[in-house]
Amino acid sequence: MARNKFDIDETLETPFDIRHLKRALVYCGRYKGKIFLSLTLSAVAAIVGLLAPLFSQYALDVSLPEGNIPQIIILGALMLASIVISVLLSAKRSRIMTKVGQDIVYDIRKDLFEHLQKLPFEYYDSRPHGKILVRVINYINSISDLMTDGIIKFILEIFNLIFIMIFMFFVSWQLALVVICGLPVFAVVMLLIKNKQRKAWQQVSNKSSNLNAYIHESIVGTKVTQMFTREEVNAEIFDKLQNNYRKSWMRAVTFSNLVWPTVDNVSIWVRGAIFITGLLVFGTGTVSLGNIIAMCSYASRFWQPLLNLSNLMNTFINAVSYLERIFETMDEPVSVCDKEDAKEMPEIKGEVSFNNVTFAYETGPNILENLSFTAKAGESIALVGPTGAGKTTIVSLLSRFYNLSGGEIDIDGTDISSVTLHSLRSQMGIMLQDSFIFSGTIMENIKYGKLDATDEEAMEAAKIVGVDEFISSLPNGYYTEVNERGSGLSQGQKQLISFARTILADPKILVLDEATSSIDAKTERYLQRGIDHLLKGRTSFIIAHRLSTIRNCDKIMYISNKGITECGSHDSLIEKKGDYYKLYTSQAI
Amino acid sequence: MFLLRWLWSNLSGYRGRYIAAMFLSVICQSMYIITPMMSQRIVDTFIVAENGAEMVRTQPDLLIMMVAAMIGFTFLRTCMTYSANMLYESTSQAVMYRVRKKLYDNINMQDATFYHTHRTGDIMTRMSGDMDMVRHSVAWIIKNVLESLVLFIVSIVYFFSMDPITALCLIALTPVIFIASFIFKRKVRPMYVNLREKLSQMNTLAEENISGNRVVKAFAREDHEIKRFDEKSREYSAANKAAALKWMDFFPTIEITAQALSVVQLVACGIFVVMGRITVGEFTAFAGLIWTLANPMRNIGTIINDFQRFSASANKIIELYYGRTKVADREDAVELTERIKGDIEFKNVSFSYGKTRVLHDINLNIKAGETVAIMGATGSGKTTLVELISRIYDVESGQVTVDGHDVRMMRLKQLRESVGVATQDVLLYSDTVEGNIAFGNVDMSKDEVTKCADIADAGGFIQKLSEGYETIIGERGVGLSGGQKQRIALARAVAVKPSILILDDTTSAVDLETETRIQEHLRNLDFNCTKIIIAQRISSAKDADKIVILKDGTISDIGTHEELIRREGYYKEVYELQR
């Protein structure tokens, strides 16, 4: 899949089919008891509600002509009672359904988020993060209306419709047919609109996704925007995206808003048709006058549920354009996952061997070809070489962030693709090029490496990397609130905090990927001393451009041309006078 | 009613349309009452009337005409309703567009201190979920208020004109609804504020989880993240339920009162009929129109509910809307006519982040065209120092001048345009490589882009990417190695042909051969510029005209490579370390 950017619409892999609906219903199915109870309550409430006009009718027909005031008062009391019962039942139903609806939304969100956690780097790398975020938050919120009220109303209105139809045929089948004649007209209009409407709402979800992606990037990149005085250019792009969104919205509502007037008009045509056919065509003999009046009221009752159903249809078509995106994300294949018979990785001793490893990102060219090496337990290995040669890739493969295109990686003789990801990764300590600081306290950020660590352990880790002094100098010390941008941490300090995080995790294999690039040489030296004893007994992989950092490693591998071109200790490589020697001498001042 | 005034001010340019929409919906609302009357007329004339059958036979044309009138009337009404709705949609979109644009511009202007207190997820909430509430209120809440009000007034007038006493009996119930609504309003308000806050928290957590996905995976913290998100998601769900259920507490009172109008009508009118005050015809008329009174009354609750929700969101938006940044153009700012030469001077500059002092009494003079290296321990204030030049922050005391002008007196745009920064934290955009390099200068030709890439020694690897300069790179540059990202950032900075070029640790992840080539290219730029290089490696700094050593926010030493290696100090220590 090609990378997506903020102004490219995401193509939908699968067109809408009934399966989306079925899948949504699976979520509803978990609450079928409550939904059924709500339905029953609604039905009872509706029937009790229907009684109220009867009391009024009775008063008009009987009590008023008789002038029976006590009876009128009794009727009033009965009517009030029926209203109270009906409203209380409806309220009870709404209470239940509000909870059910929110629970369903919560369930869907949970499933989506859990699936997102399983998705590999490629997924996150190939689209703007704002587009992922909008699915988890906004899209799911958009379907909550449908889930809270939609289902119940839908079922009720269908029942209503059937009920009234039966009544109509009972009163006069001829006029009932007239009423039903309106249906095809309505159906044709709906069919004409439906497809356009669906496409239009899909566009809306696309455009809102684009807009949100750009907003997200802009917020993250404000500083860069300011430094490059890009405000105006950005504003233009933003304008364009907003305009696209607005246009798509207006187009969608152009269709959606048509539904209601259509039903309204057709219902009036039907009423007119009843008068004309009832009075003129069938003549007064066939259909009684009372029946005509009754039919008129039934006709409007027949169209009311239809009106409500068509509104529901609108909500539904709108929601589906979000649902399909949500389900699409849930169906995103998990390329890096536990095999069915995956075992737990036993406690790692640290022997690592790459056997003929070949690797390419997606369908790109091979980054590594037939790479083989073995690191003994406890060895420290340095990876050097030109930028882009694949050093980061090698260490990423070690934690199985990607699947190999060929070959095998063994740790302590166990193929890492045969063990669970969690048992593998939780024993690895990886310091990435990009450190990421979560919003929260510094303490929380360090403890991310070991969730159940004590404060003392966290502080100890900070001391080892030499950031303790700085943290303690802050007004709130370890409890200072920090976040990814802002909060006054320098890049080097962020790196040190993530370093402490890694140390705290007490990994069996340590990977330092340019972990110290933003840290000055003196601090680094201090850091080095601190972690040297930590490295003892642990296998470690170090990527660094400052050769002073790696001179003391047991083994130095020069990575270039999709493989290892030189390998050996510092001294032996210097003697060899090859690539490493060239690199080293160029660094001498 | 500050919120409504605020909405109104954002409606400018669309007020005519909005008023037209309101006008149309009022008319439609009145017409809505008339349709049943027309239907009634047909029934009265042709069915109920004693000579009904006669009428059908003698005047079928009249029947057809009346039916046609009813159909035509409805058609007209629905057309008007449709137009009104579309007008509401377009005006509400316009308001949302305007407010969002304003917010966007405002976010872009905020100085860095803004981001200490505002998390990305929270700003995202304001720009999406909260914004939708603004749209909703313009399109539907206000429309609903207006229609209910009109219906209520019309029916009150109508009822009074028919029989004042009956009307009074009916109105007697309204205080119940008002009191219930008032209490409801006070109770539900904090709940919507809370709900909005929970949404923002959930958004923040999801945003950080997605942005930090590499760290999450590296530490195999998926389960932990799921647990944390679950907690926020559950809280949001609970807040949603709480607000909705609070409404359910009041719904029965309001709904029963509204429906009880029919009971009052039945009993009161019934007794009046028996007493002979009103006729049976009037009784049925009251019964038939009682909904015109009941509907507006039951709407009050929904309106208040929606409005409280809107106001919780609107307050968050308004905070950003009127948010001002301290770093802005002064009114008497000077516009320089010629290209900035690049003389920089720091005079007694001090700066703090919150309570933490970062820079203290810095004095430094950099001449146009010079290359100055800044070195120092992590957290010694290097990045902050250069950020003061382009006013990412403003100094706390002292002043920074460029070409002799205090930077705070210059036009921000002009100042920043003349400073090119290759940032330490490389933020690239999900755009093509070309788009990223031409970021600060969108009109660049392809040749110029290539040239800048070559200066940064990036041309080679860019061409090897699957689609060369057209390759889309992920957000934050994912998929590129650290050194590759840094070189694109450098090309981006060079592309604006700045008078002051700042390389903030730009070559730390670049191998030395490449760095040497880049340095060579930078010496031979085809425009004049002052270069400031923040570095950790001696190799990056040694050729500078001047090397500044920062220690705990003060300049501890300054000199050339040759001078500094001859005296004890930070530079010499680092030099020894890196030999």
Image: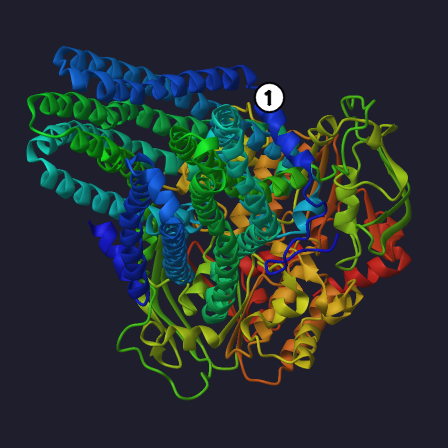
Q: Position of residue A48 (x, y in %)?
A: 36, 16
Image check: B220 left or right of A233? right
Q: Residue at x 43, y 35 (%)?
A: A284
Q: Is residue A101 above or below residue A438?
A: above
Q: Amino acid at mark 1?
A: Gly
Image check: A509 left or right of B312? right
Quadrant of image for the C terminus of chain A: bottom right
Q: Is residue A156 above or below residue B27?
A: above
Front in this rendered view, residue A305 or B86: A305
Q: Position of residue A559 (x, y in %)?
A: 83, 53
All told, the count of numbered labels is 1
- Figure colour scheme: rainbow
Q: Is residue A85 above or below residue A322?
A: above
Q: Is residue B579 visible?
A: no
Secondary structure of the residue carrying tag 1 is helix
Q: Position of residue A577 (x, y in %)?
A: 88, 60
Residue bearing the label numbered 1: A29
Q: Residue at x 73, y 67 (%)?
A: B514
- Characterize the local packing of mark 1: few (<14), some (14-19) or many (20 or more) Cα atoms within 10 angstroms: some
Please identify the quarter of the rendering in which residue A81 is found: top left
Residue most extreme to the bottom: B338
Chain letter for mark 1: A
Please identify the quarter of the rendering in which residue A385 is found: bottom right
Front in this rendered view, residue A540 or A360: A360
